[in-house]
Image: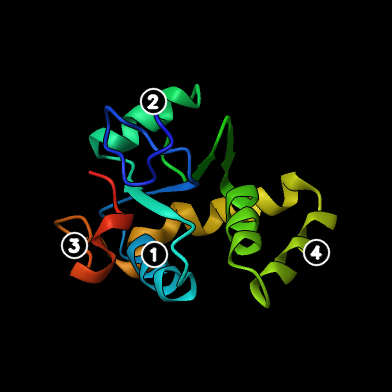
């Protein structure tokens, strides 16, 4: 593994990578929301279903069956509400204000997250294919 932020499954990045459900319309919408709010390109993205996603899950010690948002940042992996809060922090002001949510016990935060996650396909739909990024940000997406 190298520090190349544009790495692939065999050359995993050390930059923070957000793993998301590539066929979830809500998840794809969140990624589309995040990309323009991160003009420096600090975050990378990979569908959980991709080779890079599976490799990063393995590197983080998580099973392939993980069905939640995961932020892999160096040797740390954040899941569910902790991943959402950490991504907001990485975006900077005003999104970093989300860190105040840490005063809510993680069990409560994750229970709220789980309600949305369990209903995401019913409420927002399911895609047949993973998100295809625009050419100008394609280097932020791992395959």
The quarter of the rendered structure image containing the C terminus is top left
Compare marks 3 and 1 and give the one earlier in the sequence: 1
What residue lies at 25% left-to-right and 54% top-to-bottom? Answer: 23
What residue lies at 48% left-to-right and 75% top-to-bottom? Answer: 37
Q: Which mark is residue 57?
A: none
What residue lies at 27% left-to-right and 32% top-to-bottom? Answer: 9
Whole-Å distance between the Cαs marked 2 and 1?
A: 25 Å
Whole-Å distance between the Cαs marked 3 and 2?
A: 25 Å
What residue lies at 40% left-to-right and 69% top-to-bottom? Answer: 35
Figure coloring: rainbow
Compare marks 2 and 1 and give the one earlier in the sequence: 2
Number of other residues with Cα within 10 Å of mark 2, as a class: few under 14, some 14 to 19, many 20 or more? few
The quarter of the rendered structure image containing the N terminus is top left
Viewer-nearest of discs 3 and 2? 2
Compare marks 3 and 2 and give the one earlier in the sequence: 2
Whole-Å distance between the Cαs marked 3 and 1?
A: 11 Å
Number of other residues with Cα within 10 Å of mark 1, as a class: few under 14, some 14 to 19, many 20 or more? many
Location of residue 128 in the rendering, given as x and y in whole percent from the top left corner = 14, 57
Whole-Å distance between the Cαs marked 3 and 4?
A: 33 Å
Q: Which residue is mark 1?
A: 31
Position of residue 26 in the picture relative to residue 70 (left or right) = left
Number of other residues with Cα within 10 Å of mark 3, as a class: few under 14, some 14 to 19, many 20 or more? few
Q: Of helix, strand and loop, which one carries label 3?
A: loop
Q: Quadrant of residue 131?
A: bottom left
Q: Which mark is residue 100?
A: 4
Q: Of helix, strand and loop, which one carries label 2?
A: loop
Residue 65 in sight: no
């Amino acid at each position: 593994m190298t520090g190349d932020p544009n790495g692939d499954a065999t050359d995993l990045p050390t930059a923070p990578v957000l793993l998301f459900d590539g066929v979830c319309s809500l998840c794809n919408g969140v990624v589309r929301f995040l990309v323009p709010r991160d003009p420096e390109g600090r975050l990378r993205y990979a569908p959980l279903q991709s080779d890079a996603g599976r490799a990063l899950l393995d590197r983080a010690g998580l099973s392939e069956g993980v069905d939640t948002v995961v932020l892999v940042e160096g040797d740390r992996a954040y899941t569910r509400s902790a991943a959402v809060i950490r991504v907001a922090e990485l975006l900077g002001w005003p999104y970093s204000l989300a860190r105040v949510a840490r005063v809510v016990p993680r069990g409560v935060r994750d229970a709220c997250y789980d309600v949305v996650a369990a209903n995401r396909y019913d409420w927002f739909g399911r895609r047949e294919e993973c998100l295809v990024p625009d050419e100008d940000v394609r280097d932020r997406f791992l395959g």
